[in-house]
Amino acid sequence: MVEVVERRMIVPNLHLLTVEAPEVAESALPGNFVILRPDALGERIPLTLADWDAAAGTVTSIFVQVGASTAKLARLKAGDQIPSYAGPLGNATEIERFGTVLLVGGCYGIGSIRPVAAALTAAGNRVVVIIEARSSYLLYWEDELRAVAEKVIVITRDGSRGYKGHVRRLAEILTLEGVQPDRVIAHGCTFQMMAVSRQTLPLGLKTIVSMNPIMIDGTGMCGVCRLTVAGKTRFACVDGPEFDGHEVDWEEFLARRESYGPEEVEPLHHSGCSSRF
Amino acid sequence: MSKVDYVRRPMPKQEPCERVRNFDEVALGYTAELAREEASRCLACKKPGCVQGCPVGIDIPGFIGLVAGGDFAAGIRTIKETNALPAVCGRVCPQEEQCEKECVLGKKGDPVAIGRLERFLADWEAEQGALQAPPLPAANGKRIAVIGSGPAGLTVAADLAVLGYEVTIFEALHEAGGVLTYGIPEFRMPKAIVSREVEYVQSLGVELRLDYVVGKTRTVDRLLESYDAAFVGAGAGLPWFLDIPGENLNGVYSANEYLTRCNLMRGYRFPAWDTPLKRASRVAVVGGGNVAMDSARTALRLGADEVHIVYRRSRDELPARAEEVENTEEEGVIFDFLTLPVRLIGDGRGWLAEIECRRMELGEPDSSGRRRPLEVPGSESRLRMDASICAIGNSPNPLIPMTTPGLDVGKRGNVIVDEATGLTSRERVWAGGDVVTGSATVISAMGAARRAGRSIHEKLMGGDEREAP
């Protein structure tokens, strides 16, 4: 049982959830995720960490409301108890002095990229962040990101702020901004991470993506989170969740993520984007 | 002397046509009358082979004599001197390879149904109301961290709690019981029974912390700052696949996933419970162990029209418990023996459509003593299937080895221990169960946990082995 400290919608359909989980907060590292259950009958839902405070004993994630399970999460209020909150899970993001690091965040990933930016900046990197959304009203945490990065670049689909378009303009935007990254890290929906990886491949930029498959136990037991990376089956919960975006079999990954289409609440780390764009 | 009775009393079961439509327990257990009749067959051998055959050394003729005499309370006490989980062992131990294999009656007829009698006593006790905790000694001031609440963890926790240790069990999932909860289906291991056994262990003063992923929430080293010893019973890890094309198609599951969705997450009660489980109509289960039988029977109960067990050896080599093979056959599962899947074929939209298999024949015995299956070239054929469940085993759970420096592991990721004591390469860290052996039986995990408990007691208290359980 953990207690909800705060749950609020930060932009339409995206919610912030902070719970009291002192031991998770104490062990949390950038790139980790937790698995929680909203109630006794609920699914085990993986959420990437967006913030934590070891002193206060709190942990924060951002999630998208897409179906029944996340609707349950979105109804929580401060003081509510949720039955399960396990973590921090997964391997932490590799933090070294790489030089210039470009971080790309979309959807819940605008939140989860923030601790990565903070750690990379603290490690002496020049950190540039690109955040993207369909429209300006879906952006959040811009100030928080500016506090931990040298530069924050905005892309909106409708051009209501920053560059108009999609992260598929990445190569062009890097040229316009004069940014030459030594490493790229992307957090967000599958389509965004796939698009980033496809953009950086011809540029020869090492690109790390934080994969978000369906999970059940999240501790290396059930095998549902498997994906093909460099021709080999890997398990996102214990081998990842971060992998080289140029080595991921994206088609297979997309098919597996959508395998529970109608029955399952659509997996959570999803922005509502689709293959149409 | 009365005539020796060679005929085992059958245990009442749900009829196959009835039980494939529900998730209730298949075997209904002996009545008191049947139990006493069956127990009366025991010859009370002076040198009982059955006790030698039991990995935890239960006083089998002792408890069976008490059943025959109708003193069920004394019977269950006798079992519990050496086995904290009789309701579990009575249901899932492979008795035919252990205690019952050594029964002298088995030479000319049916061995005494030791497992069924053990189960009878455990269920009888539960019917009498709350399980009685034995009197506990004063706390000895030592603290033990037990990682995993499966059969091994529960056993070592109970053994040490009754010796005065302060024990905390750390469980990664949201329900205790390990494989008894996430793996073995309701129809074979009712979850109410698992809960009862867990509550019994808690009644001994053992603290249970759920949703606590040791290695992640806190490392073993961190726990050892406030605990005197740790026992690692983290259980099964990543499922093995056949390593053939098409295994990441949709509709292809590991047995761990399929059974966890159904059992731990109650997928069979979707949408009342939130976690879904696909209702496939034609299902192939690859493998021949208990997990394969459980998966096949689960698929039937979820409404499949046709379920196949695809096994590369023959019926004689099936590693599953005899009673489960029999139940599986009765329920109408089709066994494709001497058959090896070589390729999974998709429908062009990412879903499984067909499984290509090759015929096998048995050659000379291999290192396991079983005849080695050999592929017959050119014998390919296809099975039309919309789900395939891979039940060929798994490696030990990787989280503890990944996060515990100095903990030696073998080639398959198994934690290396001293077999007699369960001590790992790390001081103050013991291990037992599937995390050491890879997929094995509940009772072998319990046996290993018992040995580790003795060793922990000896190391920490200089305890005489004979005092330990």
Image (tube, coloured by chain):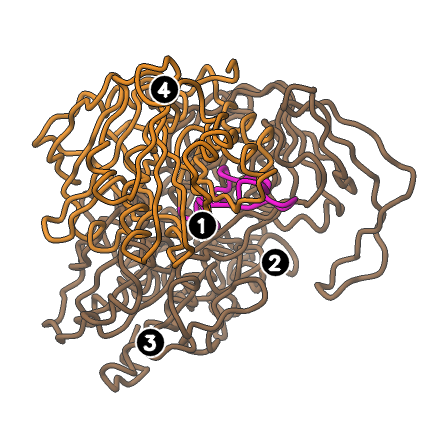
Chain colours: A orange, B brown
Q: Is residue A68 placed above or below B91 in the rendered structure? A: above
Q: Dot 1: few (<14), some (14–19), or many (≥20) neighbours within 10 Å? A: many
Residue designated by label 1? A238
Task: Describe residue A1's horizontal placement relative to residue A67 as left or right.
Answer: left
User: Are discs 2 and 1 less than 8 Å apart at CB?
Assistant: no
SS assignment at label 3: helix
Q: Looking at the image, which residue is at 37% across and 72% down? A: B430
Where are the magenta residues, as a range? A219-247
Which of the labelled discs sits on residue A156, or is there none? 4
Residue A20, image quadrant:
top left
Task: Describe residue B231's horizontal placement relative to residue A220 as left or right.
Answer: left
Q: CA distance from mark 3 to mark 1?
A: 33 Å
Q: Dot 4: few (<14), some (14–19), or many (≥20) neighbours within 10 Å? A: many
Residue designated by label 2? B106
Quadrant occupied by the C terminus of chain B: bottom left
Residue A38, image quadrant:
top left
Q: Chain of mark 2?
A: B
> Residue A131: where, in percent of width, then height?
34, 30
SS assignment at label 1: helix
Residue designated by label 3? B454
Task: Tell which tag, 3 or 1, sits nearer the viewer.
Answer: 1
Q: Chain of mark 1?
A: A
| A66, B77: nearer the viewer | A66
Task: Tell which tag, 2 or 1, sits nearer the viewer.
Answer: 1
Q: Is residue A4 placed above or below A138 in the rendered structure? A: below
